[in-house]
Amino acid sequence: MANRQSRNQGTEVLLMALREPGRMKGFGPDEWDLLLRIARQTRLLGRLAVIMDESGEVEQLPVSVQQQFTAAQVFVTHYQRTARWEINRILAALEGSDVPLVLLKGSAYILAGLPPSRGRRLSDVDLLVPRELLENFEQTLLASGWEAVKLEEYDQHYYRTWMHELPPLRHPERLMEVDIHHTISPLTSRLRPDPEKLLADSIPLADSRLRILQPVDMVLHSAVHLFHDGELANSLRDLVDLTDLFQHFGQNTGFWQELVDRARSQGLLRPLFYSMRYASRLLAADIPDSAMNATADGAPSGPVLRLMDNLIEAVMIPEHPDFPRRRRAVAQWLLYVRSHWLRMPPGKLLPHLVRKQIMRWKHRQATAGTLLQGNR
Amino acid sequence: MILAELPDDDLSQRLSGTGILVQTGPFIVRIRSGIDDFAPLLKRFYAHFPMVAEPAIADFHIHLKQPRSIRRWWHPQALFMLDGQSPFLPYPRSHTFPLFEWGLNWGIAMQAHQYLMLHSAAVERAGKVMLLPAWPGCGKSTLCAALVSRGWRLFSDEFGLVRIDDGQLVPLPRPTPLKNKSIDVIRDFAPNVEIGPAFHGTRKGTVAHVRTPDASVAQAHVLAPPGWLVFPRYRAGAPLRLKPIEMPQAFLKLANNSFNYKLLGLQGFQAVTRLVRHCDRYILSYSNLDEAIDRLNQLAEA
């Protein structure tokens, strides 16, 4: 196990399973042992379980794999049920008002039955609400029992002044967090897509009180979220989402042209470029050359692109759990810095990071001695 | 091959290398350890547990290691890692064995959702399982150790693992941890029972482990249906009382006591329903262990 080959194996086995699920049938015990650990760590175990289930060949797998798959599916089913219930409760709280409720990310995939929902866990419900109705909406939820999760004054200020979402809310009887967005990119970010267009072109679900973004906007939001909003740590799952959306909507005629046009008009060519590049490089997403080429002017300069290739590969390809690599930690730190750089101009960024670090120290002191370190 | 057959040197070497694979009930656990004093205790308490040949698919990957802080020079510690993640803060190194036991329990409770998991002791006699579901302090481990010392087969002191398809109980025999006064209570009750070293000042006070009977380990693959649900309630000075309870009350108590009832949704509801339908159901109030064990033995003989 402690040899070089198995270290590298850790980096390949999950990507292989995601790209070509059929190959899992040929896996030996060593490969399964590693795959199950890595998939669990990257929140993709449920996904593999559902895909094998759909293939109808799950019974050919080793019994212990079937058992772990079953357990993972129980977990995912529970979270998806919990998300549906949370949305049900929000609709009940909103009864009588006509706030359009646009679901984003995980909850949209699940309620619309889109491919990324397969085996996908989610821990919050993300919603998009017109900015002018935001306060009203937040007050309605607060009056119906939801509470603010982030109570520090600075956190509240951070969200309300600079972010694209309100500080998260949670109902004390339930675990699911509700994130209310009024646009898809931080207010301080250099990307400024127009949320009015997203709302205007959103489409209703069978329950017409609920809406989702139209396909091209759904892809672009996922792209912005992954490459311009998060820290990219443990984010392979988000790239899997994007790959699913590309494959699924890519079947529609005119989709790719429309996608590129929308990205251009919303100023989101860069995140779309990254999404296509890494979905095809890491997960073998089938993206037409014409679409790839059309986003070329969204690419960063040569040296930056080479750096991003290295960083993305280092953080997205999971490492062997027994052999953590320093390269990955460095890449994660650099991408953390990048995520803040993209989110805020330097004048705001430095004071923000200093404050966050002080808060973190204080928090660590306050919680030292407690048993659980907050397991993810 | 069982763990007792592995020479000490090989054991230490493998623990500090790629680890050993031990089967406990339905689970295969890979154990690695960089803590010297851990190997003898592991060997003592898991002597008759089967070792699994490489390569195998493990359910849990545990690594006990020394955290890399400067504290190690004056206050040596042990860190529990499950799958490369450390869910707990480090423990004093002298508490590595209880840390391993708790950590593995935690891992099972977080992960094994293919079963309905009850927070319950489970013991078997004449082909039927008695479940003793309870919260800490109700005396479930004490009753469990006492029943096992009188010939009941140990399924588990911590987990009632219920198979979802058919409601059968799955054995998960492991050392039974006794806390504080219970240690002497069991020593008096069953002087022949082997109890390991006492670990003082853990988060649950003093803890000492009862070694699992070899016969229970040897039969760890033999499942059995549930027969009795007994909710124990220890109270100093209380008279012995075994009170039958109705199905709805037993249902609520059991659902609340489960680690993953909510997670299992409809399957959880059905599994708990089946359990309360198939079992005789009681609340056991007791203070005198001898009386309580006699009473429970009578139940089994009836």
Image (cartoon, rainbow, N blue to C red):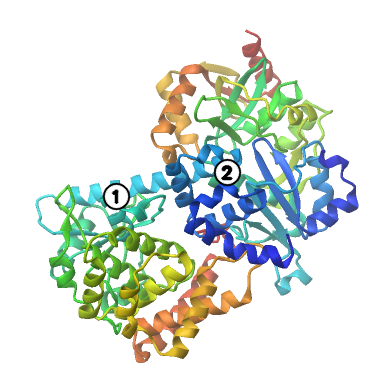
Tags 2 and 1 both on a single chain: yes
Q: Eyeballing the image, is B48 above or below B150?
A: below
Give the side of residue B220 with respect to residue A37, left or right: right
| Placement of A24 over or under B219, stated as above or below | below
Where residue B167 appears, as percent x and y from the top left, is 52, 25
Determine whether, in the image, residue B65 is placed left or right of residue B161: right
Mark closer to the chain start, 2 or 1: 2
Q: Is residue B204 visible?
A: no
Taking depth in this image into account, of A353 and B29 the one nearest to the observer is B29
Instruction: Name the residue beneath numbered marker 2.
Output: A65
- Secondary structure at badge 2 equals helix
The residue located at (42%, 32%) in the rendering is B267
Q: Chain of mark 1?
A: A
Looking at the image, which residue is at 78% across and 26% down? B215
Residue closest to the far top: B302
**Residue, far front:** A289
Give how far across and how far down residue A11 sits, in percent: 59, 65
Whether pointer 2 and pointer 1 mark residues with C-beta atoms closer than 8 Å, the reply is no
Front one among B299 and A289: A289
Q: Bin the neighbour count of mark 1 within 10 Å (Cα to Cα): few under 14, some 14-19, many 20 and up.
A: few
| Image position, residue B23 (x, y; %) | 71, 40
Dot 2 amino acid type = Val
Q: Residue at x 35, y 49 (%)?
A: A174
Q: Is residue A280 visible?
A: yes
Q: Residue at x 48, y 55 (%)?
A: A44
Give residue B98's position: percent from left, percent from top. 71, 48
Dot label at residue A113: 1
The kind of residue on which mark 1 rests is: Gly
